[in-house]
Image (cartoon, rainbow, N blue to C red):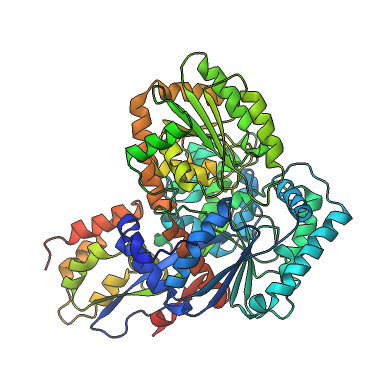
Amino acid sequence: MEQHDIHQDNQSFGVKDCTIIRRMGGVDSAFNLRELRERLRNCPIECLYYHFCETLITPTFDDPEFRNDFALWAAQKMRDLALAERLGILNPYSFDDFEDMRERIIEIIDERLSDMQYIPSVVRGDEFMFMQAATVVFDTGIELYTPQDLIKRLPEMSTSSIYYHFLEARRRTTDRVDDFTFWMQFQENKPEEIIQALAQVDFYFLSLPELKQALIDSLEGLQ
Amino acid sequence: MIERTLKDYEAVAGEIAISQLRQLAQSLKGARVVHVNSTRVGGGVAEILDWMLPLMQDLGLDARWEVIEGYDTFFEVTKTFHNAMQGNPSILTQSMIDVYEKNNEENAERLRPILEEADFVFIHDPQPAILLDLCPNRRGKWVWRCHIDSSRPVRKVWKYLESKVQNYDASIFSMKDFAQPLPHAQFLIAPSIDPLSQKNCDLDQQEIDTVMAKYGIPDEVPVLTQVSRYDRFKDPLGVIEAFKTLNQTIPAELVLAGGGATDDPEGQMVLEEVRDASSGYPNIHVLLLPSDAHRTINALQRGSAIVIQKSIQEGFGLTVTEALWKERPVIGGNVGGIRLQVHDYYTGFLVNTPEGAALRMRELLRNPYSLQRMGTTGKQFVRENFLLTRHLREYLTLMLSLERGITNYVLTESSEN
């Protein structure tokens, strides 16, 4: 994906929002681990991005036990909790390149396959279906001029805005930081405390409403 | 058509959701959008278009809704398509294809100028699907919107339909399980309900009591209700069987309430079978309601302790969404979109047999606390996922995505500045 510089100048920050629409990944479904491995090898990288990152802003009934769809499938459909745990701990934002993550997932599946006496399959309806999504980004009309504006206006931002600026930004920007931090680095009096507080939020395992609250809490009382 | 504005939805969907829609629609202002389906009343598609049109117009889109016309023979053919798409063994003959194509050609004569000038055309379900071929000078993006559970279609029928829909720019399915391989992008949009419609708005207890009394439904015992067309896929006979089993241990009333749709000629036959099966049971109420009896259905759902939707094939199952919105737990068939909405022990129970339905009816009626807890959970679930604001947002997102060429990342004009 190309890098999008959302900052119009070094002073202000235009808050954006995003919506996604899901679509089929264009890859055959997988009924067992061996098929999953083969499909993973060839699927568009956007499928990996969807199942690890964008799945967070799609409708779900409750907070799932794992944050990526591969781990969830392993746990809920394959009933393979060991594999689910190994896949579930992967943090997509810690990889420099999603191709590296693809290799790591395949490595984990290969290890699991080598332990198996036979390869169990799921019934029709429980197969893994590869998906991807189109993201549309738009302005919210909210403009931040100082770091204090960020603290003040965070509560009125949508969870999809939080997703776009705090999570998705890490894929967009070369230094893999959130948009807020990137913006504040250019402030005349760099707000170290705020930047530090944002850096300490352990975001990957939170739902978006939880992440929004964690950001609000971490910045509370800071100047 | 109901004239409501987005402002009306702020209280129920939240200011952020409405603001998102307005921002998103900025880049689509003035776009000519045409929806085409086969009935203006009856069924989930007509209900969706009923609210979607005025809201798209409120957002500045030039949206209109066209309905194809046809004789009974045409709707018998399209009912065959519908059944076949849901996997019901069906035979498609050349004479049926001729009826289908000729009828659509007549409609195309009337609709062609509008459709060929439109920026976006949404063709709903198989009935008008061939219109794309009949509009060779089209300039906009054409999307085939399939509302049916098409996960296991009759191959020969699908092969014919596939030849008619493969040239669309994109298709939309309600669930990933329903999508069929096609040579274009297949998007997923779950349907939704309008919380302010006559069918879903709040009612006072007096109005609910009046409706229940009108149909002779006593209020001394719990009421269980299934609202759906008289259609074999909705399994009304299975519901009656389950209720009869329940009735051996718990006194209750069963309401089967359905309307007819102009494109469903099979309904009368199923209704007769239902009447036969309930004959001799004064606590089973079989109601044939007019297509505009939305407020009555609302009252029946709210007057019930449990709502049933024991389908054996289902598209999305909007009656389930409606019941959850009214804080009623749902006992639903373990099929289609019902699986997305009914979560065991949280919003109701998924069942596979009449015995399973009887078991869960009994379990819920014996546990009033569970009834209440599941009701609260269900409403919140619908608020977060299945209100029309989410649905509209996804249509706008799809249009923007199509307009810019289907990619994985689209910036709207104002965001690019």
Q: Quadrant of residue B234?
A: top right
Judge whether B59 appears above or below A130 on screen: below
Which residue is nearer to you in this view: A80 or B312? Answer: B312
Image point (39%, 22%), residue name: B220
In this rendering, is residue A120 above or below A104? above
Q: Position of residue A169 (x, y in %)?
A: 37, 69
The image quadrant that residue B131 belongs to is bottom right
Q: What percent of the width, then of the height, locates residue B239?
A: 58, 28
Report the side of A33 relative to B103 (left or right).
left
Screen quadrant of the C terminus of chain A: bottom left
Which residue occupies the extreme right position in the image? B94
Horizontal and vertical percent for residue A197? 20, 62
Residue B29 visible in the shown view: yes
| A106 sits left or right of B106 in the view | left
Extreme-front residue of the structure? B214
Q: Is residue A154 left or right of residue B75?
A: left
Q: Residue furthest top?
A: B249
Please state which of residues B133 and B266 is positioned toward the viewer in this rendering: B266
Asked whether the viewer can see residue A92, the reply is: no
Q: Residue at x 53, y 35 (%)?
A: B226
Residue drawn at x 49%, y 50% as measured from the top left: A69
Q: In the rendering, at what x and y percent does residue B169 appear? A: 65, 70
Marks counted in the figure total: 0
Q: In terms of image quadrants, where is residue A201?
A: bottom left
Where B106 sits versus A92, above or below?
below
- A108 vs B329, left or right, is right
